[in-house]
Image (cartoon, rainbow, N blue to C red):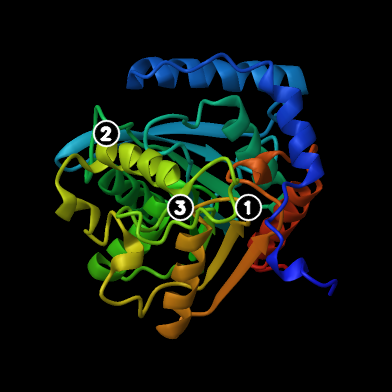
Amino acid sequence: MPRGSRYRRPMLDRAVAAHEAQTAALLAPEPKDPAGRRRVAGENDTAVSAALGVSPLHTATAEHTVPVAGHPDVRVRVYWPGPEPAPRDAGLPILVYFYGGGFTIAGIDWVSWDARFRERARDAGIIIVAADYAHAPEQRFPTQPEQCWSAWEWTHARAEELGGSRDRLAVGGASSGGDLAAAVTLMNRDRAAHPIALQLLENPALDLTIGHADARGVSARMPGVIVRKAGRMLVRQYVGDDTKAARNPYASPLLADSHAGLPPALIITSELDPLRGDGEAYARALSDAGVDVTAVRFIGQTHGSLGATGFVTAADVAHRLIVTELRRLRADS
């Protein structure tokens, strides 16, 4: 190791820098009000996807509305790996997945998320059930975890009907969706104890007190205090001003009293993402509780860069890693 290299500040992957430069001119500035920010963010996603040639595959899908006791219904979209729905009792694994968007933006109708679900379902040969949970601040905790729990219960009850297997169910999510996926595993342990073969967490937010955020690798121009302030703003929109709510384990799964009995996990983090601290601390907590866990940190990557498959080499590697792990759930693998 060259002298002094131990102390070098982490560097942005050149492919990520090129991708960000390519898309920056396409992004309209987002207004501060939540509804306006959500609208413009969706328009930006559409514009960037069109400019980059991102087009969802023609795989079979179906939409359902799932009732949620005491909260708004949640829409789910089922993605099959081929052009036709899988036949009943085909025995395919099913991944119940929750998109990322800081609890406030994005959704299963975004071109980028829809394309990702279709590509993963096809490449892994599995079924994906994606839940379109509600946005904050219009809907706040605990609406979102309850919606995600209901989507999970709905999938478990209809697994064979969808062409899947109750013995090969997985839960996953990215960013805020990773928070919700981990919350669902806790809720499942506490309420039902259905078998979960895998939890897949990508750059997850797992401690909404911001106690594990790690801003050291982000940028010398982005002091940690700014990163934490931005994080707390999103948290307030989600849980409100009650600081106790942020410590609820279904809001901050990392803060649960026990992580014993949770499903095996694959946790992916990025070096230049403040949430890497959450994901890596959660990996240690799971391991300490006797849960099988694999944690992979991608060097030079940011919070969102691993979604840029086809443009960032590391994103392609992350996709292959996830697909390989999901394919292991297949009976014929």
Residue 67 in view (yes/no): no
Spot the residue most to the front.
4
**Residue 108 at x, y = what percent?**
50, 32
**Residue 167 at x, y = what percent?**
49, 68
Q: CA distance from mark 2 to mark 1?
A: 25 Å
Residue 33 in view (yes/no): yes
Label 2 SS: strand
In the depicted view, which residue is nearer to us: 40 or 233? 233
Q: Which mark is residue 36?
A: none
Mark nearer the viewer, 2 or 3: 3
Label 3 SS: helix
Label 1 SS: loop
Q: Quadrant of residue 93?
A: bottom right
Image quarter where the C terminus lies is bottom right
Q: In the rendered view, does 11 fall on the left or right side of 70?
A: right
Amino acid type, callout 2: Asp
**Residue 301 at x, y = what percent?**
68, 49
Residue occupying the point 82% across, 72% down: 3
- The residue pinned by badge 3 equals 178
**Residue 252 at x, y = what percent?**
31, 58
Spot the residue most to the right.
2
Q: Quadrant of residue 18?
A: top right
Q: Which mark is residue 73?
A: 2
Q: Which mark is residue 126?
A: 1
Question: Label 2 neighbourhood size at 10 Å, few (<14), some (14-19), many (20+)?
Answer: some
